[in-house]
Image (spheres, grey):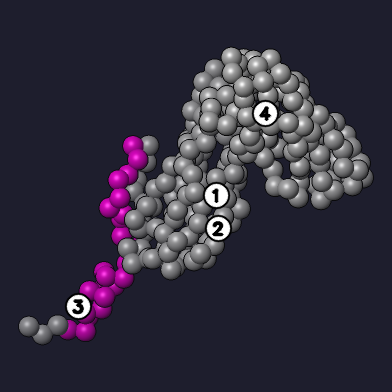
Amino acid sequence: MRITGFFLLVIIAAIMAPSVSSAQQPSEYTTPIVVDPTSMARIEFLERFWDFGRVPRGHIVYHNFAFRNIGSDTLIITKVKPTCGCTAAPLSTDRIAPGDTAKISVTLDTSKLRGKVRKFVNIDCNDPVNPYYKITFAAEIDSLNKDLVVEPFIADFGEFASGSGPKITLEIKNGSSSSLTLAIADKPSEDIMTATFSDTNIPVDGTAKLTLEIITKVEVGPFSSTIALEAEGSPGTRVSIPVTGKVIE
C-alpha cells in the first residue's frame, strides 16, 4: 500500500508528539501529565521521607530533599506543589543535567499545628517512568521528649555582627533508662554552622553539651536553619531544634 507524503507527515508527528503518561496518577490530580515518552530523563530521590521528630510550636524547621538525574537527557521539573499552606518547598534549579544533583528545601511552619502531623510535596517532571513524585515529612509538634531533653529547645543567636562567629551552647540530658549515644541526624553545611558535642555518650540522668558556632560566610540579614539530634539506633528520640538569628553589618 502506497503512503502519501501527507499521511507520512501525520504518522511522524503522532510518533514524536508528547503523550499522556501511563504512570499511576495520584488521586489529587485532575488532569494527567503530558510528557515526551522518548525522554531518557530519570529522577531519583536520595530519600522520600523525613521525620523531624519533636519540634517546638511556633517555629519553622527545614530539611533538604536531594535528588539527581540518573538518565541521559536533561531532567526538567515542571511543578513543585506542597499540599499544605504551612509548607514551602523552593527548588534549587528546575533543569538538571545528566548526573547532576538538585534539592528541594522543605520548610514547615508549626505556628498553627499541634500534635502529630504528616505533610506532602508533589513533584511533576519530564521523566516518563516517574512523572509524578511525592515526598513526605512528619513531625510531632510541642511534644516533650522525655528520653532526650534539650535546653534551651531553640538556638536563638539574636543579632550578631557579620564575621563575628557567635556560639551557643545547649544542654542535652538523658532522661531514659539506659545510656545514650548522641548523633546529628541533620544540620546545615559546615560552611554555615558547626556543631560539636562535649561527649557523645551520656549515662542515665547524665548530660552533655552541644556547641553551635556560626561561620563567617553567613549573609547579612535574618538567619534561620535547623539541627536535628537523636540517640543512635533510636529514631523515636529525634528532636529538631530551630536555629535563628540576624546578621548585621
- Residue 7's label in the rendered image is 3
Whole-percent x, y for residue 207 in the image = 73, 21
Between discs 1 and 3, the one toward the N terminus? 3
| Residue 100 to residue 220: above or below | below
Q: In which quarter of the image is the C terminus?
A: top right
Between discs 3 and 4, the one toward the N terminus? 3
**Pick the front one: 146 or 187:** 146
Compute the Cα span from label 2 to label 4.
35 Å
Q: What residue type is labelled 4?
A: Asn
Compute the Cα span from label 1 to label 4.
30 Å
Pointer 1 residue:
66
Magenta-drawn stretch contains 12: yes
- Magenta region: 4-27
Residue extending farthest to the left is: 1
Q: Which amino acid does label 2 sit on?
A: Thr
Pointer 4 residue:
201
Pointer 2 residue:
101
Dot 2: within a 10 Å radius of its alpha carbon, few (fewer than 14), some, or many (20 or more) residues? some
Between discs 1 and 4, the one toward the N terminus? 1
